[in-house]
Image (tube, rainbow, N blue to C red):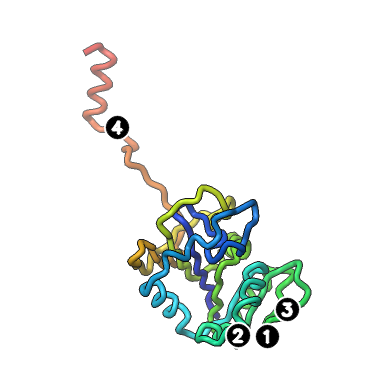
Amino acid sequence: MRKIIVTTFMTMDGVLQSPGGPDEDRTGGFEWGGWQFTYADAISGQAIAKIMSEPFDLLLGRRTYEIFAAHWPYLDDEIARKFNRTNKYVVSTTLETLSWKNSTLIGSKVVDALKALKEEDGPDLLVHGSSRLVQTLFANQLVDVLHIWTNPLTLGKGKRLFAEGTPVQEWTLADAKISTTGVIMATYLPGGDVHPGSYVPLEPSQAELERREKWKTGG
């Protein structure tokens, strides 16, 4: 069984929309595209290299696939070679054909298809961007590893990582680093159920009982 590994860049207020460039995703009049660019450094570069050091396939939503397909096939660096030769699984209900080699369309019964994909033999599935796909993965608890890179800025509006409808669950912190530019790079694994507690004692203390008694008697 292979894992689904999500890597997400987000702001302190949870916005993940269009981190890489101004025209990446202007949905809703978003004007801050490319907000993540100035926070890259050697430490974050090493972290990305580590994530991609093991064999992997790509699992992408439509918009991210189209951005990647218009970029990576025309480059010849280490990342481009990996992306170009690996299998790409694309979740979309609107695309009919895929131009990037080694691409497979998942267009119907998406959740069942994703579950079946996880059950197959093969390398882990890396998810980059793909905000709508990530919501589907969260809703069906299909994320096995979650890399969240929290950048030190707030934008106030835009698509957010944890949207309404995110399931209630705990996450276990597996690793954390901080870049020289202040990016917190945390890795989480799915935990168990949420166990609420209280700092307020369920039963009043003896001192509280005595205070209430004095109040009643006017003492």
Q: Which mark is residue 204?
A: 4
Q: Please, what is the three-letter code of the amino acid marked with disc 4?
A: Pro
Q: Please, what is the three-letter code of the amino acid marked with disc 1?
A: Lys
Circle 1: element type: loop
Q: How much space separates mark 2 and mark 3, taking CA atoms?
A: 13 Å
Quick one: quadrant of the N terminus?
Answer: bottom right
Answer whether labels 4 and 1 touch (C-beta < 8 Å). Answer: no
| Percent position of residue 55, x then y | 51, 86
Quick one: quadrant of the C terminus?
Answer: top left
Tell which circle, 4 or 3, labels the residue nearer the N-terminal end: 3
10 Å neighbourhood of mark 3: few (<14), some, or many (≥20)? some
Q: Please, what is the three-letter code of the amino acid marked with disc 2?
A: Asn
Q: Which mark is residue 101?
A: 1
Q: Is residue 18 visible?
A: yes
10 Å neighbourhood of mark 2: few (<14), some, or many (≥20)? many
218 lies left or right of 7 = left
Q: Residue at x 62, y 65 (%)?
A: 133
| Percent position of residue 58, x then y | 59, 78
| Residue beneath disc 2 | 84
Answer whether labels 1 and 2 touch (C-beta < 8 Å). Answer: yes
| Residue beneath disc 3 | 98
10 Å neighbourhood of mark 1: few (<14), some, or many (≥20)? some
Q: Residue at x 45, y 64 (%)?
A: 148
Tell which circle, 4 or 2, labels the residue nearer the N-terminal end: 2
Q: Residue at x 25, y 11 (%)?
A: 218
| Percent position of residue 36, x then y | 47, 63
